[in-house]
Structure formats: C-alpha cells, structure tokens
Image (cartoon, helix red, strand yellow):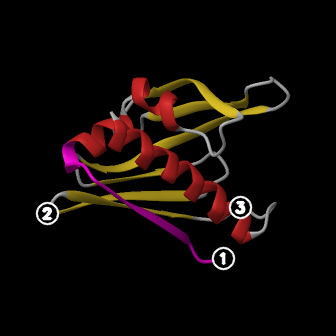
Amino acid sequence: MASKITINATILADKNKVWNYYTQPEHITQWNFADPSWHCPKASNDMQIGGTYSARMEAKDGSFGFEFEATYDEISDGEHFSYTMPDGRQVTVTFHENDIATDLVIAFDPENQNPIEMQQNGWQAILNNFKKYAESH
C-alpha cells in the first residue's frame, strides 16, 4: 500500500472550537465539500470507539453524490481520532493548539482509483473550506 497522504491547515481558533466544528453534524454539513457546486446535505457522527461517521456529499444539481462512511478506531477527546473506511483505508485527524490557533493535521491512506495528487488536492480543498467556515463563525 502507498504511504499515507498528509494535509494540514492552521485555523485561527482555539482547539475546543475547532474540534466541535469538525465533529458535530450541524457544522459538518456547512463545510464538508471541496467545491461550491457541491454540498453536504446530511451528516451523522456517533463519536465513540466502534461508532459510525457518515456524511452525504453530492453535487448541488443532483448529478452525482456519494456516502462517506467510516468506523472509529481510536478517540482522544479534543486531541485526535482515527477511523477506518469500509475499504480498509485508515485516517488519523490530529488537533494541535499553538498560541492563538489550532493546527489540524489529517493523514489518510490513498485509494487506488485516482492519482495521489488529485486525492491530496480534494481532501485539502475540503480542509480549506473547513478553515474558512470555522474562522468566519
């Protein structure tokens, strides 16, 4: 398997706010898409070991969409969590507070359908959208 892809962003907010905005469904639906022509009409998050994260991502015109699902493997509240997608790929999300900001680092196993750069750019675009949302609310 290829090595993990890592993306990151520095959010100008305290770690507690960043954690909440990243994990609570009412916030997830506001930022969880890579492009303005897409949206996230629903999300659920049972944040416990063995719990399921689920988010519906789709084009606003209804032409395409998919369910993103994962099961939690590890959670250290406010610090980091990891989950596994149905195809066995794993993701780790880490929150590091530094002075007036929080560094959010995501490491994920790539899938083998799309080029690494495309996957990295797509996940980074979603993270950039999260940063914009968290800093403006």
What's the residue type where badge 3 is placed? Glu
Label 1, residues with CA under 10 Å away: few <14, some 14-19, many ≥20: few
What's the residue type where badge 2 is placed? Asp
Q: Earlier in the sequence, mark 2 or mark 3?
A: 2
Residue 63 rendering spot, x and y as whole percentages: 85, 28
Label 2, residues with CA under 10 Å away: few <14, some 14-19, many ≥20: few
Marks 2/3: CA distance? 35 Å
* Circles 1 and 2: CB atoms closer than 8 Å: no
Residue 116 rendering spot, x and y as whole percentages: 71, 70
Residue 121's quadrant in the figure? Answer: bottom right
Q: Earlier in the sequence, mark 1 or mark 3?
A: 1
Q: Which mark is residue 99?
A: 2
Residue 47's quadrant in the figure? Answer: top left
In what element is the residue under mark 3?
loop
In what element is the residue under mark 2?
loop
Where does the N terminus fall, quadrant-wise?
Answer: bottom right
